[in-house]
Each structure stands twice: as structure tokens, then as C-alpha cells.
Image (cartoon, rainbow, N blue to C red):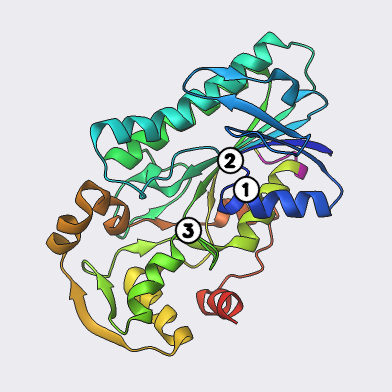
Amino acid sequence: MARKILITGATGLVGTQLKKKLLKQGYEVNTLSRKRSNDPNNFIWDVYKGTIDSTCIEGVEAIIHLAGEPVAEKKWTDERKQQIIDSRVKSTQLIFNTLKSNPNHQIKSFISASAVGYYGDCGEEILTEESPAGFGFLAECCKLWENAVDEGKKLGLRIVKLRTGIVLSTKGGALPQLDQSVRLFVGSSLGTGKQWTPWLHIDDMVDMYIEAISNLKMEGAYNACAPFPQTNEALTRAIAKQLHRPFWPLKVPKKAIELIMGQRAEAVLMSSNTSAQKILDAGFKFKFTHLNDALADLYR
């Protein structure tokens, strides 16, 4: 089992929790960051300048790659979309080039984030890891991202890609944005409300990365989603129930969402009915398989 891990994107929602748990379990953790800190295990890199402190990989046996510009935070201009892609693809390439320049490294496993956006908008179709890449910006971004990650196979690395849905946490990510309208007593479905929304509790997301480190049989892509995806309507209803707020049967029209969000509406209106069978077959045990239980834990 790898005992020293390098994490990129360690200051993000998942990275922060993952680092804490790894340290608690006795792992050593190095991090790559754009900013200096007092942490002697934090190393500096600049993806866009192509610079990296190569000592970050000394003694490291596995890399967890979470770095990437937030997808829905800013308007999708052509420049912003290129930043979203480059932050994922170029960062991966920079790491692999570092490994090539240090052939005596000890790294055996490369665990990378990906997203269910890989499949595009697929309506009711049940999506397994064998389903093809879809269409649209998110699908294209994920495809380029995963292709870059797969280059690690040429370096003899075990590659694991976790195609993540909505990670539920009250500390950041999508949930505080989803529950905002509910808290304001105007909770309702977005678009048709029938679009499938894969989700998982933050604790399960963290545990899944740790499982990917320790379970050497895991390889390739996995849908990182709870076994029972929910529609947007069901998700919003469940949030309203937990917050003791009304859910209104009215629907926010697609055109209104597109007017507010522009091209980013793709991320909200996309339907991804993902299967979790492969990760279950790998032996992963979810703490939270049902949405109501996950939300009750987060809002307690």
C-alpha cells in the first residue's frame, strides 16, 4: 500500500477533506499548489508557465490529481473554456513530463478526477463506463482530460479515473447553490426537472479516492456516484424536505436558465443516469446509498 501521496488541488472541496483523512490514517501527504505556505510538504507549480518543483515526487508512491479550474464559477467565454481544459490537460502533462525527467521515481499509481459530463446529455439512457463520450463542451473537456491521463499508461502507471457527479457537502460545491432557492422559499425544478443528477456524499467521495489508492485491482474509469441517482425534481424536493421549506410544482424554464447562465446552463440541464455497478463490483462500500440519508447527515 502506498504510504506517501502527492495531491494536486488539495485546497479544493474534496482535496481538503481527503488530505485530512489521509493524514489521520497515517499517510504522508505532499501537495502541489500555486501559492507558497508554511507547510514543508507543500510544493509550488505553475501549470500555465510549465514550472514545477520536481522534489514534490520524492518518496511518493501514488498521485491523486484533483487540480482544475472550477467549471461553473464564471461565464463560459472562449478564453474561460480554454482555461478549464488547459488546467486539466496541461497539469496532467506537466506531471508526466516530471516523471519522465526523473526515471528513478517510485510512483506506481495515478488517480485522477474526471466527471459524468464525459457522457454528455443522455436523457434516460443508463450510463456505464463503457458508454461512449457524448457531445457538448463538458463532454469534450472530459474526453481531452481523460486522454491526457491515459498517457500515464505508457509510463507503466496504474491509471484510475473517477467520473464524479455532484459531491454533496454543506462546505462548498453544488449543494449550497442548489439549496439557496429552497432556503428563500422558492424551491422548484430546473428545466423539465426530469434530468438525472448523479450524486454522492463528500465522505464517500473521499473514501473512494482512498480505496483507489489501496485497491490495486482498480483500474480504468469508474462512475463516482451513489447507486441511486435522482432527478433534479427529486433532489430539490429532498433538499426542501430536509430544510422544512416548501417545494413548488412550478418549473424554471430552460430559456430563463440559459438567460441567466448562458452556455453554463449545459451543466445544470444535462441528464446523466449513471450506473454505480462497476465501483460496487470493485468492493467499494458506500456509507450513503440513499439521498435522504445523505442530506440528513449533512444538514443535521
> Which quarter shows the C terminus?
bottom right
What is the crowding at mark 1: few (fewer than 14 residues within 10 Å), some, or many (at least 20)? Answer: many
Q: Earlier in the sequence, mark 3 or mark 2?
A: 2
Residue 134 shows in this picture: no
Query: Residue 173's mark?
Result: 3
Marks 1,3: beta carbons within 8 A: no
Q: Which residue is mark 2?
A: 9
Predominant secondary structure, magenta span? loop
Q: Earlier in the sequence, mark 1 or mark 3?
A: 1
Q: Amino acid at mark 1?
A: Gly
Residue placed at 48% from the left, 84% from the top? 242
The CA span between labels 1 and 3 is 12 Å
Question: Where is residue 186 shown, x and y percent of the image?
Answer: 28, 81
> Which quarter shows the N terminus?
top right
- Residue 83, compared with residue 278, is above or below; it is above
Left or right: residue 87 compared with residue 141: right
Residue placed at 24% from the left, 32% from the top? 78
Q: Amino acid at mark 3?
A: Gly
Question: Where is residue 75 shown, x and y percent of the image?
Answer: 27, 45
Marks 2,1: beta carbons within 8 A: yes
Q: Secondary structure at mark 3?
A: loop
Question: Is residue 216 on the magenta stretch?
Answer: yes
Q: Which residue is mark 1?
A: 15
Residue 124 shows in this picture: yes
The CA span between labels 2 and 1 is 6 Å
Q: What segment carries the magenta color?
A: 214-218
